[in-house]
Image (spheres, grey):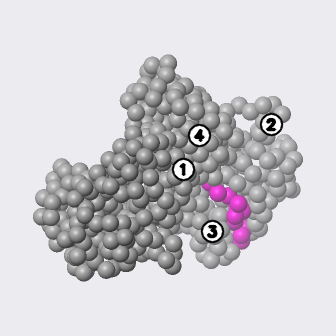
C-alpha cells in the first residue's frame, strides 16, 4: 500500500482528544480528497452515514458505548476500507471481536498509519498526541485475530504508532503476542487484560521485570548505582525497542544471560547506546543471535554508540563478528579482548614473518616492495584488527584479499587504508565479502589512494571505491570511507620513506573528499 508522504505531513489524527472542530482544523490543513475523509470522531448510526467508501480512509474511528450499530452493520459500513490513516479507538464497547476491520482481499492485509506529533502547528503548541490504536475497557472482547492481517506503517519521520490494550477483562493476548503484527511492534502497551504481552519497558522497579521474557518499548537504564536488583532481567529473551544504558555502575550486560533477539524499527537513530558507564569493561551478551531492524526502507540503518566507557572496555572476536553483521557505530570506544592462546590472532610484524593462512590478523598490516611473494599468506584472511597499507609494490590486483570480511581499527592515528605508489595496480578491489569497517569515530575514517597506475579505477567504472558493488545500502554505508589522495582528488604530501608506513606527512592537503555525508 503506497501513501503520499507529502499528503500526510501534517496529519495527526489521534484518539480520544479531538472534537469535530479540531478534526476539521487538521483536515483543512491536510486537504485530502474530501470524499475519503471521515469527518466525525465517534461512530454511531447517524455518523456512519457519511463514512467514506474509499479504500484508504483518513480520520479517527472511535467506537464506544454510544455506538448503536451491530457487528454486521459495522462490517458493511467499513467493507471498502482496507487502509486507514489516522487513529482507531474501541473503548467501553460491547464488542466481542474486532473483525469489522476488513483486510484487502488481494493482499490479505489491512494497512494502518498513524502520526506522532509534537508542536506541529500553532493551534497545538506544546500538545502531544500519543495513542494511535487504543483498545480499552471492553468487557466482552475476546477476538482480535483480524490483527494478524494488520500492517503498521510508521510516518515519514519513522515514528511508530502506539498500540494500547488495557482493561479488557476477557482478552487473552498471549496467543497473539508472537503474531506478525505484535512481533514487529515497538510501542506496545498491554495492561490488566486477561493475559498480557511481555513487559513494557517503562516499569518503576527492576524487580517488576522478574518474570519477563519479552520487553516492548525497549530497555532504558539511567543513573543506576544500586545493582542489587539488576538480575531481575535475567529471564529476558527478546527486547523490542532501543537499548539505552547511561551513567550507571554496570560493568557488563551479563545480567541478561538469555537475551537472544534484539528487534528495532529505525532509520538512522541510535538503537543500542552504551554511554558514560565508566565501570563497564565488557559487553557479555552470551546468547544474542540477531539484531533485527524491521524497517525495510532503502537507507534504513541499525546504529549503535559505545562511548565513554572504562578504558579497558573490550569486545571479544565473536562479539565483533556478530555486530559486524548488523550495526554501524557512531562511536566505538573499545578494543579487542584477549583471546585464548590457541585462537589468538596472528600478530603482524612483517609479511615475511607472518604465519601462513591466518584468518585473523592484529596490527597495522603493511605490504610493500618485496612482499609480493608473501601475499599468498593472506588468502585465508577474514578479520583484520588494524590498518591496511599497500605501497610501492608491483601488484596488479588484490585478489589475495578476496575473503576479507571486516576491518576494525579503533585508533585515530592513521588512515584505515592506504594504497600508495603501486605503479602496476589496475584493479584495487579488496573483495566483495567485506561487510563492515569499525572505527573509533565514524566521521574519522580515511582512505588515501595516491600515485598508483593511471587506470587504477578502470575496473570500478572510474569510481573511487575499493569494495565493488552491492545492492545492500546498509553494507555500502558500513564500509564507506572518506577517500582522499591524488587518485581520488588532490595530491597529499606523505612520508613515504622506508619504515614510514605511508603515514601522514608533516604537511598534507585535501582538496576533494569523497565524503560519508552523502549517507547522512
- Is 429 drawn above or below residue 478 in the view shown? below
Task: Tell me which residue sits at (78%, 51%) in the image.
Answer: 381
Front of the two marks 3 and 4: 4
In the image, is 236 to the left or to the right of 336?
left
Per the image, the residue denoted by label 1 is: 175
The Cα–Cα distance between marks 1 and 3, rounded to whole angstroms, is 40 Å
Quarter-wise, where is residue 124 in the image? bottom left
Measured in 3D between alpha carbons, the distance from the residue under mark 2 to the one under mark 1, in whole angstroms, is 45 Å
Compute the Cα span from label 3 to label 4: 33 Å
Residue 431, magenta (yes or no)? yes
Residue designated by label 2: 343
Q: Which residues are magenta?
A: 425-438
Mark in front: 1 vs 3: 1
Q: Tell me where residue 495 appears, x and y as whole percent.
A: 61, 50
Residue named by callout 3:
470
Q: Secondary structure at mark 3?
A: loop
Cα distance in 3D space between marks 2 and 4: 29 Å
Query: Circle 4 is placed at which residue position?
Result: 237
Disc number lying in front (1 or 4) = 1
Identify the image quadrant of the N terminus.
bottom left
Amino acid at each position: 500500500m503506497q501513501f503520499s508522504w507529502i499528503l500526510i505531513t501534517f496529519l495527526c489524527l489521534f484518539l480520544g482528544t479531538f472534537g469535530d472542530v479540531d478534526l476539521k482544523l487538521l483536515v483543512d490543513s491536510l486537504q485530502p480528497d474530501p470524499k475519503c475523509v471521515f469527518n466525525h470522531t465517534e461512530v454511531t448510526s447517524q455518523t456512519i452515514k457519511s463514512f467514506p467508501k474509499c479504500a484508504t480512509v483518513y480520520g479517527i474511528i472511535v467506537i464506544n458505548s454510544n455506538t448503536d450499530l451491530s457487528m454486521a452493520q459495522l462490517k458493511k459500513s467499513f467493507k471498502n476500507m482496507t487502509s486507514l490513516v489516522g487513529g482507531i479507538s474501541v473503548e467501553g464497547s460491547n464488542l466481542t471481536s474486532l473483525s469489522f476491520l476488513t483486510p484487502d482481499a488481494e493482499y490479505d492485509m489491512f494497512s494502518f498509519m498513524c502520526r506522532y506529533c509534537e508542536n506541529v502547528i500553532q493551534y497545538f503548541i506544546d500538545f502531544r498526541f500519543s495513542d494511535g490504536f487504543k483498545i480499552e475497557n471492553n468487557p466482552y472482547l475476546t477476538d482480535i485475530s483480524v490483527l494478524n492481517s494488520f500492517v503498521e506503517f510508521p510516518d515519514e519521520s519513522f515514528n511508530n504508532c502506539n498500540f494500547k490494550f488495557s482493561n479488557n477483562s476477557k482478552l487473552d493476548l498471549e496467543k497473539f503476542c508472537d503474531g506478525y503484527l505484535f512481533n514487529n511492534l515497538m510501542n506496545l502497551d498491554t495492561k490488566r487484560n486477561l493475559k498480557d504481552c511481555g513487559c513494557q519497558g517503562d516499569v518503576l522497579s527492576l524487580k517488576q521485570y522478574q518474570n519477563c521474557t519479552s520487553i516492548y518499548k525497549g530497555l532504558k537504564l539511567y543513573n543506576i548505582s544500586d545493582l542489587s536488583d539488576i538480575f531481575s532481567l535475567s529471564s529476558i529473551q527478546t527486547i523490542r525497542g532501543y537499548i539505552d544504558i547511561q551513567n550507571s555502575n554496570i560493568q557488563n550486560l551479563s545480567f541478561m544471560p538469555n537475551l537472544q533477539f534484539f528487534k528495532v524499527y529505525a532509520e538512522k537513530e541510535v538503537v543500542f547506546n552504551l554511554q558514560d558507564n565508566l565501570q563497564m569493561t565488557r559487553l557479555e551478551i552470551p546468547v544474542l543471535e540477531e539484531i533485527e531492524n524491521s524497517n525495510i526502507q532503502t537507507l534504513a540503518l541499525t546504529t549503535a554508540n559505545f562511548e565513554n566507557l572504562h578504558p579497558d572496555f573490550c569486545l571479544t572476536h565473536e562479539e565483533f563478528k556478530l555486530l559486524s553483521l548488523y550495526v554501524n557505530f557512531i562511536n566505538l570506544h573499545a578494543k579487542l579482548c584477549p583471546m585464548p592462546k590457541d585462537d589468538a590472532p596472528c600478530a603482524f610484524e612483517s609479511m615475511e614473518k607472518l604465519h601462513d593462512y591466518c584468518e585473523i590478523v592484529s596490527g597495522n598490516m603493511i605490504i610493500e616492495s618485496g612482499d609480493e611473494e608473501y601475499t599468498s599468506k593472506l588468502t585465508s584472511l577474514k578479520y583484520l584488527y588494524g590498518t591496511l597499507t599497500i605501497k610501492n609494490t608491483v601488484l596488479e590486483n588484490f585478489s589475495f584479499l578476496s575473503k576479507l570480511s571486516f576491518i576494525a581499527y579503533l585508533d585515530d592515528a592513521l588512515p584505515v587504508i592506504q594504497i600508495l605508489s603501486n605503479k602496476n595496480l589496475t584493479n584495487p578491489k579488496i573483495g566483495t565479502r567485506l561487510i563492515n569497517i569499525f572505527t573509533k569515530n565514524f566521521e574519522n575514517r580515511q582512505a588515501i589512494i595516491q600515485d598508483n597506475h593511471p587506470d587504477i579505477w578502470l575496473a570500478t567504472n572510474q569510481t573511487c571505491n575499493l569494495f565493488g558493488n552491492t545492492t545492500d545500502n546498509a553494507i555500502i554505508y558500513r564500509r564507506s570511507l572518506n577517500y582522499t589522495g591524488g587518485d581520488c582528488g588532490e595530491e597529499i604530501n606523505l612520508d613515504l620513506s622506508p619504515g614510514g608506513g605511508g603515514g601522514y606527512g608533516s604537511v598534507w592537503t585535501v582538496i576533494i573528499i569523497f565524503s560519508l555525508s552523502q549517507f547522512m
